Image (cartoon, rainbow, N blue to C red):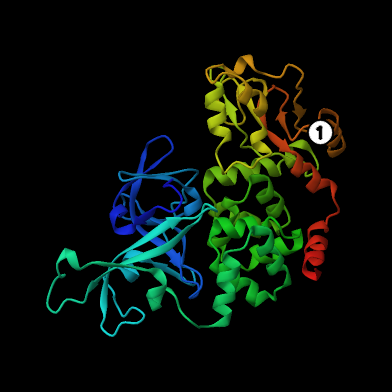
Amino acid sequence: MAPIGTSVFISRIQNLPIVDSSGDSLGILGDVVVYVRSASRPPRVKGIIMELFARRRVYVPMERVYSMDATQLVVSGTVNARRFHRREGESLIIEDFVGRHVIRRGATVPSLIYDVSMVATRTGEWEINQVALRPKPKGLGFTSRGEITVVKWHEIPELSPTSGDSSREQMYELLDMKPADVARELHDMEEGRRLEVAQALDDHRLAEAIEELPEDEQVALISILDPERAADVLEEMDPDDAADLIADLPADTAEVLLTRMRPEDAQDVRDLLAYGENTAGGMMTPEPIILAPDATAADAVALARDEDIPPALAGMVFVCRPPLESPTGKFLGGVHLQRLLREPPSSMVSGLIDPELEPLRVDAPLAEVSRYFATYDMVVAPVVDAQSRLLGAVTVDDVLDHMLPEDWRGIQLDQNSEQ
């Protein structure tokens, strides 16, 4: 990413190639999605619009933009290839602002927006910070390049409204909250308002918020969404959480959503649904960090550093023979992250395996799984089948989630609301 405080003018990165972490080309940058908040808060950058080579425009959250420079953008994780549709309150910088006539605050004559810049904040988010203006041309074309003026975002009324719909301003506040806080607000809302907020949130943020809700409210919220949107949100959830939610839906509704999900995501969920809810198989995620025996400690640390991987899941990498996607070839063992950090980067992971680590059986009941975590002081544990193939991993938060009372999330949300 660009250093904190460095401005990136959006027109200069428009049409840059976008690649994945392997360097494979995905498309080009077509636009940047923002939402305008108020005169006191700069517009927040929500994501980018990636134009695929098939002329389809898709949305990529800013959280997935791993790096950006003068030649390309690199995105991490899986990109949803469904066509982009604007959500409530969203604006596009190139389409809606660049080339637009505006009157800056304190001025009497209009100017033309030539470019808009964004800046990375200390929290890792991006915000709009500057606007490049040119005097409105008297005839066709722009005036000379020397007449460009760069002003702060709040000097442009369209980017910094002084007043407006209080409901919309409240919505923007919600969009800035952490998932647990959004869940608390959703918990206290009546159904119509809850749907309004859900429609404004992007898929990733809504998925995170739903995971923090009590089970009955998860079911109620996913059920009032359009099936295509509900499927998009389920794809963004952790597979084990999505499986738990789908298991609570009516069978016909569950099947409709599964058929609308990406085939690979739907298959992960179907596989998890085949196991008992309170077994290691029912609690695990099928996407732990898996490496071949000849991978190095540097390779393992690079994978564990991925911000999309929950901290508990990044606490250990698992070494298996090919294939390296679950179900893998023979499970050889696990390597603790701390061990990886202590060893030379060139060390092979096969030589760093914890010899005392025993995997969990896929049918191990909750009581056995909880004893395992307590006995070995683990945060993540491998799960294998009868053929010693790695199927996934259980994390300590998965275990706690199944040990606590069914309504613990609702109780916690109620208590937080009273404070």
Q: Classify 10 Å Cα crowding around label 1: few (below 14), some (14-19), many (20 and above).
A: some
User: Taking the image as drawn, is residue 324 in sight?
Assistant: no
Numbered disc 1: secondary structure = helix
Residue 126 placement, left or right of 255: left
Residue type, mark 1 in image: Phe
Left or right side of 23 for 217: right
- Residue shown at 64%/37% (left/top)? 286
Residue assigned mark 1: 373
Q: Quadrant of the C terminus?
A: bottom right
Q: Is residue 266 visible?
A: yes
Image x and y of residue 101, in percent: 27, 77
Q: Hey, which quadrant is residue 373 in on the image?
A: top right
Residue at x 62% of width, y 54% of height: 255
Q: Quadrant of residue 203?
A: bottom right
Q: Nearer the viewer, residue 173 or 397?
A: 173
Q: Position of residue 288 (x, y in %)?
A: 63, 34
Percent position (x, y) of residue 12? 28, 54
Residue in front for this viewpoint, 110 or 197? 110
At a point 61% along the width and 37% down the height, the residue shown is 287
**In the image, farthest residue toward the bottom:** 108
Q: Quadrant of the N terminus?
A: top left
Which of the 4 image quadrants contains residue 293?
Answer: top right
Q: Is residue 177 left or right of residue 374?
A: left
When the figure is inspected, residue 200 is found, relative to residue 10, above or below; the finding is below
Q: Is residue 217 above or below residue 316?
A: below
Give the image location of residue 317, x and y in percent: 63, 28
